[in-house]
């Protein structure tokens, strides 16, 4: 009898994600990988390499640039795309605001995150993408926990949780009508800790912003620390401090808080996570806290 092969849990998660990526390549004509430059989408590029090398990726990388991103992320995005030798498509929210006549957000912390939806739907229409791969995970937020791995959007880009399809025995149904598209989440079953353990095992490089560093921060009324940015509209009453921080997630600089930390290595970060009681979005994303259903409302309107 052949010797049985035993896989550890990271091997199993990796195998599942590779299977999903290959299903996307087999079932869809014009897929895309939504790439933010964050740790989850960076892990997805490693999984895509394992799924399709030595060939090219069967999809481009697509970044929806709000214009409020951390510069470290933009620099890393461009460097990684160049090193992979893959096509990177960038579309800017600022251009969408101008062409659609959208209202630029105001206030102290003018997040463009809600406006990303328009740019995303425009790029899907421009390239006729029928599947968009992303790094969302179920452990991040309760609305994300409702979605299947193949999540169907209607021809207006809207998500209806009542239209979720069963996914039994790792069988994924990608059949769609004209105008519809599917959002695909290959690492949906992973946790934040799984991602970091995988990054450690695979020796994946990340932007320095994920590791502890000294940064000028604005102290919010909640006590959270928002990295000082030219995009914030501050006044004389705002408290600015220098703290040693890192970022658990890297959305817009206007709505993504840092956490105080001395974690300067992946080992340190893993130890931090073993003690953490709040998900990275719960701890750092201001836009998720606008209402109880903030994320779900945005997803229903086309947000990733």
Image (cartoon, helix red, strand yellow):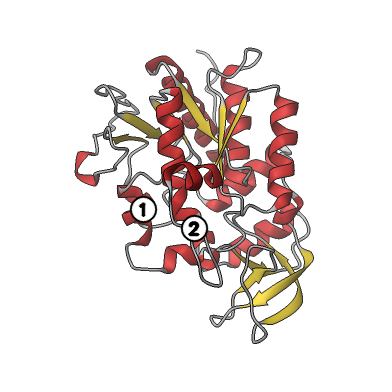
Structural distance between the alpha carbons of marks 1 and 2: 17 Å
In percent of width and height, residue 200 lies at 70, 44
Image mark for residue 77: none
Q: Which of these two is toward me, 198 or 57?
A: 57
Q: What is the total number of numbered labels drawn onto the structure image?
A: 2
Residue drawn at x 49%, y 58% as measured from the top left: 104
Residue 202 picture quarter: top right
Label 2, secondary structure: give it.
loop
Q: In which quadrant will I find the C terminus?
A: top left
In percent of width and height, residue 256 lies at 58, 62
Q: Is residue 23 above or below residue 235?
A: above
Image mark for residue 298: 1
**Label 2 Cα neighbours within 10 Å, binned few <14 / some 14-19 / many ≥20:** few
In percent of width and height, residue 201 lies at 69, 40
In percent of width and height, residue 301 lies at 32, 48
Q: Which one is closest to the eye, mark 1 or mark 2? A: 2
Residue 233 picture quarter: bottom right
Q: Is residue 3 above or below residue 156?
A: above
- Position of residue 163 in the picture relative to residue 264 (left or right): left
Residue 245 picture quarter: bottom right
- Position of residue 151 in the picture relative to residue 136 (left or right): left
Residue drawn at x 43%, y 51% as measured from the top left: 102
- Position of residue 242 in the picture relative to residue 60 (left or right): right
Q: Is residue 160 visible?
A: yes
Q: Which residue is mark 2?
A: 104
Label 1, secondary structure: give it.
helix
Residue drawn at x 35%, y 44% as measured from the top left: 302
Instruction: Tell which residue pokes out farthest to the bottom in this image.
Output: 237
**Label 1 Cα neighbours within 10 Å, binned few <14 / some 14-19 / many ≥20:** some
Q: Is residue 304 visible?
A: no
Residue drawn at x 70%, y 72% as measured from the top left: 217
Nearer the N terminus, badge 1 or badge 2?
Answer: 2
């Amino acid at each position: 009898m052949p010797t049985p092969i035993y896989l550890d849990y990271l091997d199993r998660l990796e195998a599942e994600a590779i299977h999903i990526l290959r299903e996307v390549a087999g079932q869809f004509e014009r897929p895309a990988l939504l790439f933010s430059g964050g740790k989850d989408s960076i892990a997805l590029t490693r999984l895509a390499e394992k799924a399709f090398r030595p060939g090219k990726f069967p999809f481009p990388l697509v970044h929806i640039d709000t214009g409020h991103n951390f510069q470290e992320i933009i620099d890393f995005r461009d460097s990684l795309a160049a090193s992979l030798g893959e096509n990177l498509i960038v579309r800017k929210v600022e251009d969408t605001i101008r062409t659609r006549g959208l209202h630029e957000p105001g206030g102290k912390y003018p997040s463009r995150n809600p406006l990303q939806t328009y740019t995303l739907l425009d790029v899907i229409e421009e390239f006729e993408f029928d599947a968009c791969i992303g790094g969302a995970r179920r452990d991040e937020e309760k609305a994300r926990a409702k979605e299947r791995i193949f999540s169907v959007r209607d021809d207006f880009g809207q998500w209806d949780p009542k239209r979720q399809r069963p996914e039994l025995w790792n069988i994924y149904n990608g059949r769609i009508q004209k105008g519809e598209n599917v959002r695909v989440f290959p690492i949906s079953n992973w946790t934040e800790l799984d991602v970091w353990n995988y990054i450690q095992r695979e020796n994946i490089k990340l932007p320095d912003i994920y590791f502890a560093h000294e940064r000028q921060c604005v102290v919010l009324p909640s006590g959270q620390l928002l990295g000082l940015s030219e995009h914030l509209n501050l006044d004389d009453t705002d408290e600015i401090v220098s703290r040693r921080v890192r970022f658990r997630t890297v959305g817009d600089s206007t709505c993504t808080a840092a956490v105080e930390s001395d974690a300067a290595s992946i080992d340190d970060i893993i130890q931090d996570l073993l003690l953490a009681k709040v998900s990275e979005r719960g701890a750092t994303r201001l836009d998720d806290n606008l209402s109880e259903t903030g994320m779900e409302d945005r997803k229903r309107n086309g947000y990733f």
